[in-house]
Amino acid sequence: MINPKIEKKLNKQLNDELYSSYFYLAMSAYFENNSFEGFANWMRTQSEEERLHAMKIYEYIQQVGGKVKLTSIKTPKTEWTSPLAVFKDLYKHECEVTKSINEIVDLAVNEKDHATNNFMQWFISEQVEEEATAQRLLNKIKFIGNDRQGLFLLDRELGMRSADN
Ligand code: FEO
């Protein structure tokens, strides 16, 4: 039987991952409305990846005899002033996710819940990747600034992302 404190934290993280999926989908819609199809594709793929993160937690809670508690998902921001503003939010968001993942691991260690600690290690590694990608994209977009050709090329690059990369 899972420790109730950990069950609560995992359910919160499940909700947060669903919110992440929603947030990236809002970013995708913003880019699509502004004719950046490549950026929109990247964000939509990321949104799907976030849903998979949520489902990993969903399945784990069930597997360890806990109860999945789905709650309302907050409305994401839907308007930005520029692609740079989106990528700033994206990076900030991923840093916050890392913080909450670390908190679950801290709790699992304190509560001597080795199974949850082990399960969460996948998310620890994933967040290293997520933050690095967010930072790389933010740096690129800062470098590009308002240069139309640079934005066009980055849009084309991000348009090539598919579900397995
Ligand atoms: Fe599920 Fe982008 O962290």
Image (cartoon, rainbow, N blue to C red):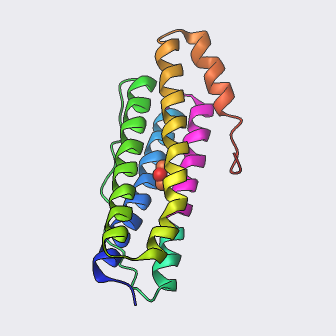
> Which residue sits at x=45%, y=69%?
117
Q: State the count of labels.
A: 0
In the rendered structure, does residue 51 fall within the stretch colored magenta? yes
Residue 41 vs residue 124, the one in the foreground: 124
User: In the displayed structure, would residue 43 be above or below residue 62?
Assistant: above
Q: Position of residue 14 (x, y in %)?
A: 41, 67
Residue 128 as seen in the image, left or right of residue 160: left
Q: Position of residue 61 (x, y in %)?
A: 45, 79
Q: Quadrant of residue 108?
A: bottom left
Q: Is residue 43 visible?
A: yes
In the rendered structure, does residue 43 fall within the stretch colored magenta? yes
Q: Main secondary structure of the magenta part?
A: helix
Q: Position of residue 40 (x, y in %)?
A: 56, 37
Quarter containing the N terminus = bottom left
User: In the displayed structure, would residue 157 be above or below residue 100?
Assistant: above
> Which residue sits at x=30%, y=57%?
74
Q: Quadrant of residue 16?
A: bottom left
Residue 36 as seen in the image, left or right of residue 104: right
Residue 79 vs residue 54, the one in the foreground: 54
Q: Quadrant of residue 11?
A: bottom left
> Which residue sits at x=46%, y=17%?
142
> Which residue sits at x=65%, y=19%?
153
Quarter containing the C terminus = top right
Residue 103 as seen in the image, left or right of residue 62: left
User: Which stretch did the figure color magenta?
Assistant: 33-54
Q: Position of residue 105 (x, y in %)?
A: 39, 63
Residue 114 as seen in the image, left or right of residue 70: right
Q: Is residue 34 visible?
A: no
